[in-house]
Image (cartoon, rainbow, N blue to C red):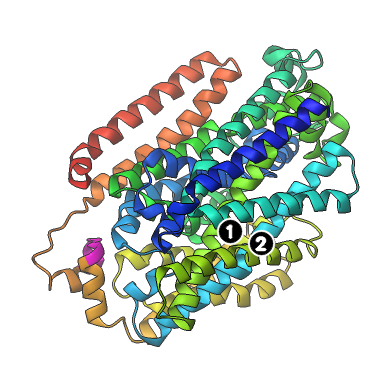
Amino acid sequence: MSFIDYAIIVIYFIFSFSIAIIYSKRAGKNTSEFFLSGRNLPWYLAGLSMVATTFAADTPLAVTELVAKNGVSGNWLWWNFVFGGLLTVFFFAKLWRRAGIMTEVEFAEIRYSGKPAKFLRGFRALYLGLFMNVIIMGWVNKAMVSVLVGIFNLPENSVFAYVIVAMLIVAVYSALSGLWGVVITDAVQFVIAMTGCIILAIYVVSSPQVGGIDGMKSQLPPFVFDFFPRISSESSSFGNVLALTPMMFLAYVGIQWWASWYPGAEPGGGGYVAQRMMSAKNEKHALFATLFFQVAHYALRPWPWILVALGALIIYPELSNSNPKMAYIFAIKDFLPTGLKGLLVAAFFAAYMSTIATQLNWGTSYIINDFYKRFLIKQKDEKHYVLISRIATIVLMIVSVIVTMFIDRISGAWEFIIECGAGLGLVLILRWYWWRINAWSEISAIITPFVLLPIVKSFGIEFPISLFYLVGGTTIVWLIVTFSTKPTEEKVLIEFYKRVHPGGVLWKKISSKLPEIKEESNFKIMFFNWILGIFLVYSSLFGIGSLILKNYYSALLYILISITSLFLIMNNLRKEIKLLE
């Protein structure tokens, strides 16, 4: 690292902080501006912000590790979430924007009734906004520490101090600027991060050791480049191709995406994704923001990381079985010249800061809107709540730093989170489309996986097979609870339907009493668009990959499928878009 590299990093921090100052006055108007940008975000900013948030400091490292262990197809461990993501686009984006609420957990009191609804709102506000949020930020902090340790060869304690400074900067600009500042900086940070990753991929692939795409393909086993997992295992000095038994494949592709809660991939939308949809200008912008997010997240982003990971298998074969994720860091140190090395470090800070900024703003919105304002201090003006929101943002940052000190490792955390949310997903989906779901359904679906998980583990059942038992058990419990408890009060259901008008046969008991509300949802078209959206994302992903890897016939086929899918989606949405504008 030279003076120029450090200067680039400093300029990046100054630029990010300047954006916060510019938007601080606007964010101070009220909590709607602070948490939802006044519900005036265009689709491209909302979509970019979603993509930037899911690009954390450890994401390229995680992809590098997946490729080292299982080849390109190893990414199916997260590519399977495409199914749920496209479901959010066509079935839920409009509903979230139409609901007119500030946070996801506020949904509890417009959909359910009585004390259970109040409890659910308050509990989820603290569970997600505080407990789960600080764990996620601690996880991201720990990953950033690992990145900087690898780049600078400094002791972890020294690097941790730098991460705290970076997080303090994020907390301050988040507290000053609210969601507007977060979203604008997200867009800039995403461009910086992806530019850096693309440049690194070019340098690694064109290096003498790799010899371009042709050299890469000649030095690595063919299975490493497979886009799809296999059923049988095939050993190699570079690792094993991703081999799934039929049950494992069904768990990933048939269950995980709709049955389990996971940050950023919640069934039915939720968390910061719901926050961006609710911040959009209108329902059309909410839909297109989420569609753009799915395409960019799964199809456009991964290939620079995958290319570096493939090159690292050749350059650093000794790391493939020991610590493969660090190959990405070594590539930065070994291949980038002065200036570009600083850009990559700035890119990692950008990825880190975009995630932390969103987590801080999103978590604070739950704590203030759904706990402090709802249950503690109810009769204050908007300036008071904005001030408390800014203070809470800083406090949340401090708590996450403390939690980071107690996190020893981040591997396996995503499996634990998926298992702890197994079975909840179906409730989160059906609560929009079935009147009989009540607050106790959701409460029981949240609690049951935590009860079942240690029992399942005691029998030696590991992820992903554990999902069959957790999802099955949780579903049985919440169904029993649903039918053995009182339904939501009819007047609440009627008001909810008037506000959101989701439609469908499972609302006939309520919709039949509201003949003035016409059925707007064409479920056949929505389902068809969902299928087309899946084809769009996967064909774009594999088309870009085939083009890069010089499989031109496959690339042409995939690209034609993606273009056709997009054309059909837009044609189906044309009439609906006019109604949404």
The quadrant holding residue 64 is top right
Q: Which residue is mark 2?
A: 397
Residue at 71% x, 30% y is 8
Q: Amino acid at mark 1?
A: Leu
Task: Pinpoint residue 234: horizontal percent, then vertical percent.
Answer: 73, 35
Q: Residue 236 at what x, y percent from top left?
A: 79, 31
69 displayed left or right of 480: right
Along the line of sight, the residue nearer the viewer: 534 or 410: 410
Quarter of the C terminus within the rendering: top left
For label 1, the SS is helix
Mark 1 or 2, nearer chain start: 1
- The 10 Å Cα crowd at callout 2, few under 14, some 14 to 19, many 20 or more, is many
Taking depth in this image into account, of 346 and 462 the one nearest to the observer is 346
- Choose between 27 and 286: the one closer to the eye: 27
Mark 1–mark 2 contact, CB under 8 Å?
Answer: yes
Q: Residue at x 37, y 41 (%)?
A: 43
421 to 541, vertically: above or below = below
